[in-house]
Amino acid sequence: MLAQRKTGFLNKFYVIEIVRGLAITMRNMLFAKRATIQFPEERRDYSEKFRGQHYIKSVNGVENCTACMLCPTVCPAECIHIVAGEREDKEKYPIKFEIDSLRCCFCGMCEEACPKDAIKLSNIYEMSQQNRTVYEKEFLLEQRGNK
Amino acid sequence: MSNQDILFMFIKIGIVLVGLLSVTPIMLFVERRGSAMLQNRMGPNRIGPFGLLQAPLDVIKFIFKEDVAPGHVNKFYFSLAPMVVLIPALMTFAVIPFAGNDFQIANLDVGVLYCFSIASLGVYGIIMAGWASNNKYSLLGSLRSTAQMISYELTLGLSIVGLIMIFQSVKLGDIVSAQGEFWNLGGIEIPKLGIFMQPVGFLLFLVSSFAETNRLPFDLPEGEPDLVAGYHLEYGSMRFALFMLSEFVNMTVASALLATLFFGGWQYLPGMGWLATHLAGESTESIYLMSTVFHGLSFVIKIACFMWFFVWVRWTLPRFRFDQLMNFGWRVLFPLALLNVFITGILIYLGVL
C-alpha cells in the first residue's frame, strides 16, 4: 500500500517547488565553491597523524634501528622481516629490513612499539605500484618522512 | 521549380542537417560540464582548453568501439531501430522556419501538425529497439515509453490549440510573423509573443515536451535504477550513439518548437534589429544578408536557452515514479489543457485576445 502523504493543493502542480529547486541549483552553480580537488595540482591536506609510507629514521647517516625485533613481534599482519647482524660501529643492526607493502595494514603498531624511534609512518599516501612491492632497507632508509 | 530554387533548397537542408548533427557534440560537452557546474563539481576539463576536446573524442570513441550485437536479439530490427528513432527526429525540423526571408525547408500547410505527427513516429523506433533486444528490461522500457508518449502527446497537442485559435494558422511561418506584431495593453505596447498570449499553454507545452523527448524528470523509459538502461540496454558503440544523437536532436526540435511557438521564432531579440540595420548599410543585398544572419542568430540563441533549460532541469529534479507520471499527465495536465482551450475561446469571443 502506498503511504498517503499530505500535499497542499498548490504543491500538486509542482510548479512552485520546481522553481525553487531550479533556483537552488543555479545558485550553487554561480556562487558555490567547487568541491573538486584537482588532484595532481592540488592536494588534500591530511592530518599529521596520517599513517602512510614507511621509513626508517636515521641520525648522521646511521639508522636508529637496532634490530630488537619488537616491530615484527607486534605486527598483526606479519609483514616486517628483519635479519640482525653486527658491524664495527654498531653492536647490532639490521642486515635485512623488509616490509611487504601489500600485507601491511598501516595500523602503526610498529611505530608505537619501537624503542629507538626508528620505524616511522610518513604521511605520503601515493603508494600505487604496478607489481607486488617489498620495501627494501635501502628504500626505507631514504628520509622521506616529516615526523 | 528553377535550378536556383533547388540549389537554395539544398543549401537550407545542408544548414539544418549540419546544425542538428553538430548539436550532439556540443550538448555532450554542455551536459557533462553543465551538470558538473550545477553540482559543484568541475566536470571534464583536462582535454583541450576548458575540456572542449572531450566531446569530439567521445564521438571518436563511439565510432571505434566494437559494434556488438548479442546472440539473442533479432538482428534485422535490432540494427533498424536506431535509424527509425533518428530519422523522424531529423525530419521534424523541416517545417520550422529558422530565419526570415523564406529560410524554411518546407512551408507545409499543416505546419505544426506535421511536427507532432512525425515526432510521434519516433516511438516506433523505441518499441522496435525494446522488442528486438529480446530482454525484459528493454521491453518494459519501451512499453513505458509508449504509454508515456501517448499520454503526453495529448497534452502536447491540446496545449497549442489555444495558440492556433489566436493566430488562426497552423503554418509555423505565419505564427512567427504574427508574433512580430504588437499588442496594446492599456497603453503599454508588448509584442504578441505566444508566452504572453498563452502562459498556461506554454507551461503545458514545456512539461509535455520534456516527456516527449524522454528527458528527466520523465526519462522512465531508460530509468537506470529499475530498468538498467531501458530500451538501449543491449546497444553499444555507434548504435547507442544514434540513440543519444536522436535524444539530443529531439531536444533541439522541442526547443525550436518552444522558441517558434512561444518566443517569436526568428524574430529579433532586443537589440538584434538595431545591430542588423547598423551593420548592413545601404545596399539591398547586405540588408538581406544581415537580416537573415541576425534572424538566424536570434533563433539559435533562443534554442540554446531552452537547451540549457533542459540540462538545468535534468540535474535539478528527481525522476517521477511511473504512477505519478501517469497521474500528472492525465489528471493535472490534460484537464488544464482543456480548460486553457475553453478559456481562450471565451476570451477570443469577448474580443480580448
Image (cartoon, rainbow, N blue to C red):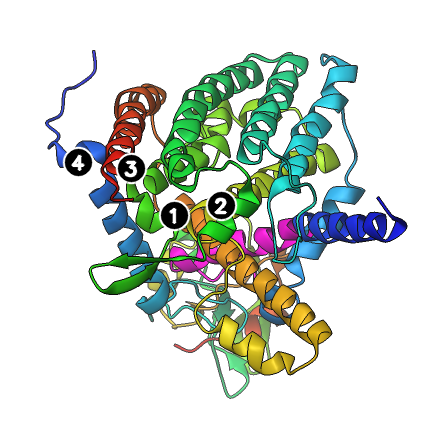
**Residue underneath mark 3:** B348
Q: Nearer the viewer, mark 1 or mark 4?
A: 1
User: Disc 4 residue type?
Assistant: Asn
Residue B26 is one of the magenta-drawn residues: yes
Which of the chains bears the disc numbered 4? A
Asked which secondary structure carries label 3, the reply is helix
Q: Compared with residue A33, is residue B66 higher up or lower down, i.e. above or below?
A: above
Do callouts 3 and 1 point to residues on the same chain? Answer: yes
Which of the chains bears the disc numbered 2? B
Residue at mark 1 to residue at mark 4: CA–CA distance? 26 Å
User: Disc 1 residue type?
Assistant: Gly
Span of residues in magenta: B22-46
Asked which secondary structure carries label 2, the reply is helix
Taking B348 as reference, is A135 left or right?
A: right
Is there CB contact under 8 Å for labels 1 and 2? yes
Q: Nearer the viewer, mark 4 or mark 2?
A: 2
Residue at mark 3 to residue at mark 1: CA–CA distance? 15 Å
**Residue underneath mark 4:** A11
Give the number of the disc on residue B194. Answer: 1
**Residue underneath mark 2:** B175
